[in-house]
Image (cartoon, rainbow, N blue to C red):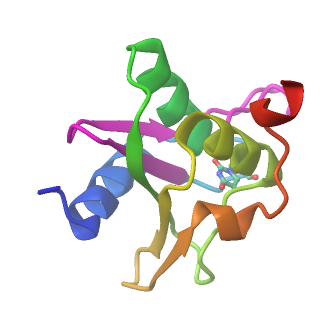
Amino acid sequence: MTVNSEELISDAQAARENAFAPFSGFRVGAALLSKDGEIFTGCNVESATYGLTMCAERVAIFKAVSEGVSEFESIAVVTGAQRLTPPCGACRQVIWEMCGNVTVVLANLEGLRETFEMKDLLPEAFDRSFLA
Ligand code: THU
């Protein structure tokens, strides 16, 4: 794969600029790399109902899946926080189900980075294999 994680982080950082976060003020960007090298980005989009808020990771994933893309390599998540921001529980479930054991790259604006394998972020995951 020719896309490196710094490129993916930079796309996630650009997507973060579009974050619609008037309630939390917490801006998040994500960039999802498909197996054939396409990148789908997302930002968090908040609702005044709070509960309808959509995280950046799921926006990126739903964009990709809705375009017919179903095989992925990695996802980068960028925030402006000092501590790196891991995906929330709902996003972990969706990343696992839609993307499998991808590489999850966390980054902030100060150059801090950490990389995980998805299986380590959601151990003993429930998925379609239990429905068989
Ligand atoms: N958020 C994300 O977009 N991704 C994460 O990984 C953590 C949280 C968003 C949801 C909400 O708009 C704001 O961050 C505060 O929770």
Q: Is residue 119 above or below residue 44?
A: below
Left or right for 1, reference 81? left
- 43 in magenta: yes
**In which quadrant is the C terminus drawn?**
top right
The magenta span reads 28-56
The residue nearer to you, when weighing 31 against 49, is 31
Query: Is 76 situated left or right of 130 in this image?
Result: left
Among the 4 quarters of the image, the one containing residue 81: bottom right
Please tell me which residue is depicted at 49% across the width and 55% down the height of the picture: 102
User: Which is nearer the eye, 63 or 18?
Assistant: 63
Q: Residue furthest front?
A: 132
At x 58%, y 83%, the residue is 82
Number of numbered discs overlaid on the protein picture: 0
Percent from the top left, x then y, of residue 6? 25, 69
The x and y percentages for residue 91 are: 70, 45
Identify the image quadrant of residue 38.
top left
**Residue 21 in view:** no
Residue 13: give x, y in percent of width and height: 36, 57
Whether residue 76 appears in this view of the structure is yes
Q: Nearer the viewer, residue 102 or 52?
A: 102
Left or right: 89, with 79 as reference point? right
71, above or below 126, in the image: above
